[in-house]
Image (tube, coloured by chain):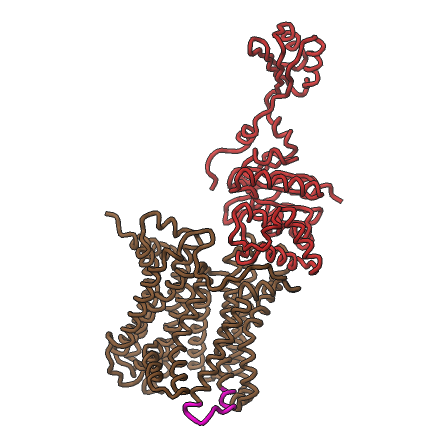
Amino acid sequence: MRPPPSLQLFTRSLREDVRGFQSHATRLLLAVVLGVGLLSFVDMLGRSSAPGRYYFNMIVHTNWIALALLGVSIFSAAISEEKEERSIGLLRMTGMTPLAILIGKGLSRVWLGLVLIALQLPFVVLAVTMGGVSTSQVLAAFVALMVFMLTVASIAILASVVRASHRGASGTTLLILVALMLGPWLVQGIGHWARLDPVIELGQAAASLSIVNRLNEIGTSGFTGAVLWNRHTLGGLVLSVVCLLIAWRLFDRYAVDTENGGEIKVWRAGRVSRVVWGDGLLWKDYLYCLGGRLGLGIRVALMFVLVMLFVMASIASRSGPDLSDIGDVLFGIAMVLVPIDIGFCLSRSFGFERVNETWSGLVLTGVSIQRQMFAKVRATLLAVAPGIGLGLIGLVLGDNVKNLFDMQFSAWAFLGGMLVFFWSLCVLYAVVVRRGGLALAFVTMILSWFVFGFMGAVSRGAEGIAVLFGFLYLGASVGALVLAGNKIRTLAAN
Amino acid sequence: MSDYAIEVAGLRHAFKGHKALQGTSFSVAKQSIHGFVGPNGAGKTTSLKVLATLLVPDAGTVRVFGHDVVREPDRVRQRIGFMPDHLGMYRQMTVGEYLDFFAAAYGLPVRERRRVVGDVLALTDMSKRADDLIKGLSKGMLQRVSLARTLVHDPDLLLLDEPAAGLDPRARIELMEILRELCSLGKTVFISSHILAELAEVCDAVTLMDVGKTKFSGPLEDLLKHDGEDAACILRLHEAAPPLTALLTELAGVSTVAEHDDGKRLVIRYQREECSPNQILGATIEAGVQIHEFHEQRRHLNEAFMSLTTAGVRS
């Protein structure tokens, strides 16, 4: 008997998953991360009353970030990869309905996420043995994570239906997720600023649906809430269904297999060729890999929203915002967002050449691979300039920020080495793997933090270990960049 | 100073145990159009990638205008334009931006870039499409843009990997016309294809590859003559002339003379070393016979291709 069409797609992706080295390597890496993470917490057993809860909280919060990154990098390719390969038409010709394609492609992604989450269950259950967390908390957290994964997958699938390329779908998914994370706080801020209680309550209700709130609620001691059916689960499922219904409704309109691929026309101006800058590589990387003025506008808008949130919250709590506090917050925001944004931009701009198969053309221009890589770094710095500017303003205005200059050398060495390593990994994975490089870099960083925690616990000399790790990170960064350069040479010759 | 644009000797390369090139040797004269022909998997693309400095060979010597591709890749890159078989392009750019970007990447000053982009667009007949997005172009248009890109830094040698693949007959003819024009501008064109007949009209010389080895390299004329069999001439007469058949049979080097169409058409087979078409024609004229047509019988291109290459699927 012939299996249903959606199951055929699911079977195909399972087969690809089983044959692919990358998927097994990712799962192994995750198991290693959890194992090392567990070892690093063993040291706390005698010193803390609830080592299990620390471990549990750390794992579940890492998970939602990893799932969000999976959504941005892999889930968003569900339909867009078929568009790029121009195979949607072929699937439709076999008699598959849009719903069958959506379910088939979506199911394979959800399965990937489920396997990753399920893999962690035995490790996380150990947190119960370590103390400070109950079985119902573990189960509630896993339910919340699965619902969050479904929501992210549905949003990513919708984005991949309406955008022509994986690049566009990934950017759209990221924007929607950021909006969902910040939206409730913005609504609350507006409510406080306008002194409108219903708006504040609406913001609070929306915030209670967020995964961060739910995990924080589950992670508190004495959690007695519902494990399965609660506001977060219902809200997530409703949002998932709505996204899938919209994707289904829009499928034939946007996921058509035309020469250009269907896409929502976000912006179409009369096209006239722009003059390339004197530094052509910088021009190309900034405008085409990193979004140019549109990307700049989005970053400025995001920064503005964050700053306004804080200002409104300050107005609500006191008579007015304190400039020094604003400075500290601005710097804090920049310190978190800029390194991640740099990783995102590097991953995007190196992956851009791989997707377009343009390395051979670039290598033949006679510009060395090192200079090509450096041009991408410069373009990245140009793209994240708003964030850097925000950090600098914060540095001038803030008072507490200045304490940073009193930080010990070991902390500087560790932080500096860690950031350089993260960015180098983003570059390496972007040229080595087709999708999910950023998520993989993030997971590798977590592994390195666990190893650092374990080493620190074993040696009882955190400062020395921090300096050692700082230099190890730098050494590993050089290795990662050399490997990336070699891989680029191979890509150019293929 | 070498007379050749390309000199390849004993070129070897293997991928994970598969021998893609097994001692390939050939040379390409300057300012000529040289075809590079062979069935799928013959080693054409690998050879082209070595010539383009993208792949370092396991063994052998490869020189482009006298420069070693392994030791002097930068000098080689300045003088070549490579058009790969896949059309890797920035599909989000317009045609003009794409060419302008590569001109900038090659280090051309802004003023010169504008002129050069205009020139290559005109040469490839793409001037009217300068503001079109690349992702909206047809396959033939993309091939033209890719060819234009290889020309922006005014290279002396063009390495074109299957540029006519997937094009309709009209686009093929137009592409060949562009190649002739480029050759007349002093450029050397090295063009690969797996269809010999496709290149026959445009090429001065050809290199035929099979299973990583050179099977033939030289003028196209020689390829058509190339094998151990006797050559043949066709003679068409106004009316049958039996004494002529006997006369020609007695000529030194002539093996057989076969009569067709009631003796009005003669097929004369001869050995190249001992006889020539001129001698046969001279003897016929001396015999006072009225001639309608006289030509050397050539092997068909496909015959030559089939006899020099092996059958079967290559691993």
Identity of the residue furthest to the bottom in this view: A319
Horizontal arrangement in the rendering, residue A459 relative to residue A38 (left or right)? right
Task: Identify by letter the chain in red.
Answer: B
Tell me: residue A210, above or below residue B263.
below
Horizontal arrangement in the rendering, residue A205 relative to residue B108 (left or right)? left
Q: Position of residue A267 (x, y in %)?
A: 49, 64
Q: Position of residue A251 (x, y in %)?
A: 36, 58
Which quadrant holds residue B96? Answer: bottom right
**Magenta highlight on residue B219:** no
Magenta span of residues: A315-328
Q: Position of residue A282 (x, y in %)?
A: 61, 65
Task: Decide which of A490, A373 is in the foreground and name it.
Answer: A373
Q: Position of residue B179 (x, y in %)?
A: 64, 41
**Observer able to see residue A292:** yes
Task: Decide which of A412, A257 is in the foreground and name it.
Answer: A257
Horizontal arrangement in the rendering, residue A32 relative to residue A494 (left or right)? left
Task: Identify by letter the chain in brown.
Answer: A
Identity of the residue furthest to the top in this view: B243
**Observer able to see residue B50:** no
